[in-house]
Amino acid sequence: MASFEIVRMDWGYALRPLMKVQKRILVGQALSYIIGVCLAVVALGTFFVPILFLDGALTSLRIGAAGISGAVAAYLLWFASRGTQSEVQIDFETETIRAVVPHRGGAPTLLGAYPFSAFSVLLRRPAGVAGLSDLALQAKDGGSALWLARAETAEIAALQSRLERDLFARL
C-alpha cells in the first residue's frame, strides 16, 4: 500500500503523502480556530463597543489591548488554516524541487527550493519494517536528505526510476 500519490500539474508533478494526520494536530488546529475567532471578536469589541455605546474615549490602553488581541487572533487563525503535511513538487519549467506545505486557503508555505543538480536519488530500507522502503533525495554534497515516500519496495523502485528519468536525464 503506497503512502504517496503522484499528482500531475501543468509545470510537473507533486508527491503528496497519504498518511493519516495525527489527531493532536487536528485538535490543535480546531482549538486555534475557535480561540482565534473569539479573540478577534474581543479585539473588535474592545476597540469599537466603548466608543459606540458608552461614549468613552479611545485610550492607548484600549488600543494596545485590541492590538494584542488582534495579533494573537491573526496568528491562531493562520495556524488553523495551515496545512498539516508537506509535499514535494517537481517543477520542470524552473528545474527545481520544492518542499512546500499546502494550506487550506491561500498560497502554500515554501520550505525549500533546490535545483535538480543538487540531488542524487537514494533507496534505503527502514530498520525493522519488512517489505517497506523509504525514498529520499540525497544531496550530492553529502548534506541532509529530502524524504519523499515510504511504501512497498516495488512501488519505491518504480518511483525511483521515474525520478531518475525525470530529474537526472535532464542534466
Image (cartoon, rainbow, N blue to C red):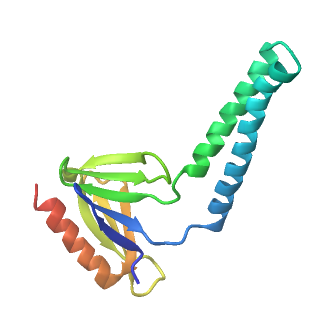
Q: Can you tell which quarter of the image residue 43 is in?
A: top right
Q: Residue furthest right?
A: 54
| Left or right of residue 83, residue 169 in this image | left
- On the image, the x and y values in percent for residue 171 come to 10, 55
Q: Residue furthest bottom?
A: 130
Instruction: Choose between 129 and 46: the one closer to the eye.
Output: 46
Instruction: Choose between 140 and 27: the one closer to the eye.
Output: 27
Instruction: Choose between 38 and 108: the one closer to the eye.
Output: 38
- How many numbered markers are drawn? 0
Using the rendered image of the protein, determine whether residue 120 is visible from the camera's viewpoint: yes
| Left or right of residue 143, residue 160 in this image | left
- On the image, the x and y values in percent for residue 81 come to 56, 50
- On the image, the x and y values in percent for residue 98 come to 32, 51
Q: Is residue 40 above or below residue 122?
A: above
Q: Is residue 30 above or below residue 159?
A: above
Using the rendered image of the protein, determine whether residue 143 is visible from the camera's viewpoint: no
Instruction: Choose between 128 and 106: the one closer to the eye.
Output: 106
Q: Residue at x 71, y 54 (%)?
A: 31
Q: Residue furthest front?
A: 53
Q: Residue at x 19, y 51 (%)?
A: 117
| Left or right of residue 99, residue 61 in this image | right
Q: Residue at x 18, y 67 (%)?
A: 164
Q: Can you tell which quarter of the image residue 11 is in?
A: bottom left
Q: Is residue 72 above or below residue 143?
A: above
- On the image, the x and y values in percent for residue 94 come to 20, 47
Q: Residue at x 40, y 59 (%)?
A: 87
